[in-house]
Amino acid sequence: MSIRATNQADVIPLRPLPAPAPTPTPTPIPTGTLPREPLWRDLVGEVLRRERRAQGRTLKDVSEASRISMAYLSEVERGRKEASSEVLAAAAQALGLSLADILALAGERLVSLAAARSRSRSRSLSRSVGSGAAGGHGSVRTAGPAGPMGGLLLAA
């Protein structure tokens, strides 16, 4: 008998292995449902990638200039990682921008997406009011947020 054969043993599990959990099937989004709220990391990553590409620079170039690993910077750009302020500042500096520039651009994008969501919400609400949800009684005044700053939605 060899040494290798003597070092092997039969393993008997003490408990049966748990059955793999079934993967949940995604719930389809009903037509007319609003898209999800954007994540800050997605917006910041989008800004970093857009600025890098606008300068015609490669991921490797910005990675080296910022001293951020290429893999991590790629994940930040794709919104997979929530970057610290130090990482964002280094990436911004490598792109010739300030941290404030990156955050302002991401904030502008967030405001434009919020406005689009609000318009979508208003259209959705006006369709439901126009389809008889108001009971067919003349004008309907609905108080509530109709834009980024709130407001009043009037439907006829």
Image: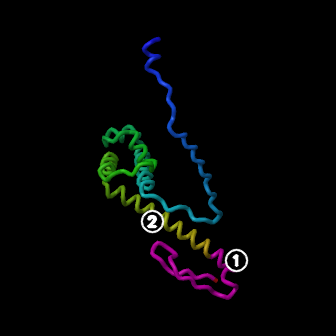
Where is residue 144 shown, x and y percent of the image? 51, 79
Labels 1 and 2: the sequence-earlier one? 2
Circle 2 crowding by C-alpha within 10 Å: few under 14, some 14–19, many from 20: few
Residue tagged by mark 2?
111
Which of the two residues, 60 or 86, is positioned nearer the viewer here?
86
Determine the secondary structure under disc 2.
helix
**Is 140 contained in the magenta span?**
yes
Q: Residue furthest top?
A: 1
Residue 30 drawn above or below residue 94:
below
Is 35 placed left or right of 64 in the picture?
right
Residue tagged by mark 1?
131
Please report the residue visible at 62 percent of the width from the left and 57 percent of the height from the top.
27
The amino acid at mark 2 is Val
Q: Quadrant of residue 155?
A: bottom right
The amino acid at mark 1 is Ser
Residue 136 drawn above or below residue 80:
below
Where is residue 53 shown, x and y percent of the image? 44, 45
Residue 56 drawn above or below residue 99:
above
Q: CA distance from mark 1 to mark 2?
A: 30 Å
Closer to the observer: label 1 or label 2? Answer: 1
Say which mark, if any, is on residue 31: none
| CB atoms of marks 1 and 2 within 8 Å | no
Q: Quadrant of the C terminus?
A: bottom right
Magenta residues (range): 126-155
Where is residue 136 shown, x and y percent of the image? 70, 85
Please report the residue visible at 61 percent of the width from the left and 71 percent of the height from the top.
124
Residue 44 drawn above or below residue 62:
below
Where is residue 30 shown, x and y percent of the image? 64, 63
Which of the two residues, 88 or 62, is positioned nearer the viewer here?
88
Determine the secondary structure under disc 1.
helix
